[in-house]
Image (cartoon, rainbow, N blue to C red):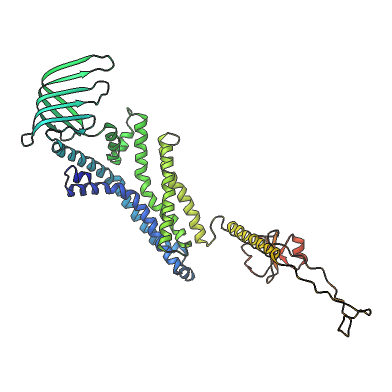
């Protein structure tokens, strides 16, 4: 909007800038899109019990995987095309387009009778400007690019020139004077000239150097990395850029391996849950990528280890999840989490029961009178003596070590996969109590 409104750039030219920037965005968004598509597709199949129907028909996860693998490979190849070819060309064209805008519209920004700070640390003032003949009449310049030696230049006439392959503007001044002050030594310089040429950069050198590395193709980067006369900082930047060109496309494969088991296990939710899950995965991926990139820049690890670290970590984790999903095994720590959750629920239930007993009022005892013969008043027969047996001590589920299934008459350790009873359960403190009660040990967990 600043280019269109303030600098007079056409909408078509701004649209071209957006097209040149697309490869930089797509390199990051295509792997994210691959992950999101897999999670939504498999999540919908799982929610509609289609995955269960496939497994019932004898179709395993390995047979479901090929279409998704083809989709990931297509994303991988397209991202490779972007990083190896279109990305450097887009960066180079973007920079050239901006330089062209600056050269094209810098003259348009020069106004008669107005102080202009178009160039950094340079203030320009002109009395009159003939745009057709490119002739400035009456010019004054305040040059503070070197804070220790500020200068003031004035001239009767001046002209602007632009180089074809340069991001600099040449200002040629005729019949003028230059005033220069050295703040360190205090020397003052006064100079009269007939022709004076002043070169002004459109971009800072630091920004140009950073963009120039991203503009190079992969072959040029490899060639520059083998040069002997190169600083360690530039060498590190080049190696990081090379590794990023190959690591970003591989993220499509990584997200595909991770998305398959997660999509199969995701029973409920739909698009919203798949979208949220993909955001979390991508967030942690790029956090790990940023961490590895900083380690590589500071030379704590090699550029390969720093850039490929998230791919390696997520690939190993995805393969483990894929194997568990193919074998229909629970995820990591799922058993422990379930057992801890059940124990916590039982503890809460017991606390509420104790609290309820305390709140109950004690029952009132009705006095009963007896006669001499032991008969109760109003009764013809004596009361029968009832033998009260000691109540069986029930073991709390929290303190229990073993759990017995009343139906199968076997006792198990907590978390045993063969223990599937939810209601027909009896708890024991030790092995002897379970055997004495007539239960047999489980062959799987061997309590």
Figure check: 4 above or below 109: below
Toward the left, the furthest residue is: 133
* Rendered location of residue 404, percent (x, y): 69, 66
Q: Nearer the viewer, residue 332 or 268?
A: 268
Q: Residue at x 77, y 61 (%)?
A: 432
* Rendered location of residue 336, percent (x, y): 60, 56
Q: Nearer the viewer, residue 63 or 394?
A: 394
* Rendered location of residue 312, percent (x, y): 45, 47
Figure check: 26 above or below 434: above
Of the 4 image quadrants, the one containing the C terminus is bottom right
Toward the right, the furthest residue is: 372
Count of numbered circles on the image: 0
* Rendered location of residue 67, percent (x, y): 38, 62
Question: For this view, does 414 lie left or right of residue 53?
Answer: right
| Residue 3 image-quadrant placement | top left
Q: Residue at x 76, y 67 (%)?
A: 437
Question: For this view, does 47 lie left or right of residue 339?
Answer: left
Question: For this view, does 293 lie left or right of residue 140?
Answer: right
| Residue 309 image-quadrant placement | top left
Q: Nearer the viewer, residue 224 or 153?
A: 153
Q: Residue at x 87, y 79 (%)?
A: 384
């Amino acid at each position: 909007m600043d280019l269109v409104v303030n600098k007079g750039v056409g909408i078509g030219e701004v649209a071209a800038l957006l097209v040149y920037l697309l490869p930089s965005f797509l390199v990051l968004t295509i792997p994210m899109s691959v992950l999101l598509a897999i999670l939504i597709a498999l999540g919908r199949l799982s929610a509609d019990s289609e995955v269960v129907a496939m497994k019932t028909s004898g179709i395993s996860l390995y047979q479901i995987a090929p279409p998704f693998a083809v989709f990931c490979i297509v994303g991988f190849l397209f991202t490779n095309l972007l990083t190896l070819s279109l990305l450097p060309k887009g960066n180079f064209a973007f920079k050239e387009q901006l330089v062209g805008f600056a050269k094209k519209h810098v003259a348009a920004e020069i106004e008669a009778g107005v102080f202009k700070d178009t160039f950094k640390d340079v203030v320009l003032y002109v009395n009159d400007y003939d745009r057709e003949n490119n002739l400035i009449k009456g010019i004054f310049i305040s040059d503070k690019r070197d804070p220790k030696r500020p200068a003031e230049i004035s001239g009767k006439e001046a002209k602007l020139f632009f180089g074809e392959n340069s991001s600099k503007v040449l200002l040629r001044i005729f019949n003028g004077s230059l005033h220069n002050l050295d703040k360190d030594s205090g020397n003052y310089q006064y100079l009269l000239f007939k022709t004076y040429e002043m070169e002004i950069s459109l971009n800072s050198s630091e920004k140009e150097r950073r963009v120039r590395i991203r503009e190079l193709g992969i072959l040029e980067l490899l060639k520059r990395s083998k040069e002997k006369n190169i600083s360690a900082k530039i060498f590190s930047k080049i190696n990081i850029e090379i590794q990023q060109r190959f690591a970003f496309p591989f993220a499509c494969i990584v997200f595909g391996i991770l998305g398959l088991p997660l999509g199969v296990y995701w029973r409920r939710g739909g698009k919203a849950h798949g979208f949220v899950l993909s955001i979390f995965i991508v967030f942690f991926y790029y956090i790990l990528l940023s961490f590895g990139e900083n380690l590589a820049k500071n030379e704590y690890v090699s550029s390969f280890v720093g850039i490929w670290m998230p791919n390696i970590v997520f690939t190993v984790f995805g393969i483990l999840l894929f194997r568990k999903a193919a074998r229909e095994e629970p995820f990591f720590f799922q058993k422990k989490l379930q057992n801890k959750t059940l124990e916590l629920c039982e503890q809460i239930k017991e606390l509420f029961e104790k609290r309820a007993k305390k709140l109950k009022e004690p029952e009132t005892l009705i006095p009963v009178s007896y006669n001499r013969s032991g008969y109760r008043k109003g009764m013809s027969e004596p009361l029968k003596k009832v033998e009260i047996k000691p109540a069986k001590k029930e073991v709390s589920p929290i303190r229990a070590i073993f759990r017995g299934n009343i139906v199968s008459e076997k006792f198990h350790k907590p978390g045993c996969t063969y223990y599937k009873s939810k209601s027909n359960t009896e708890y024991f403190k030790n092995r002897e109590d379970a055997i004495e009660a007539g239960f047999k040990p489980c062959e799987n967990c061997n309590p």
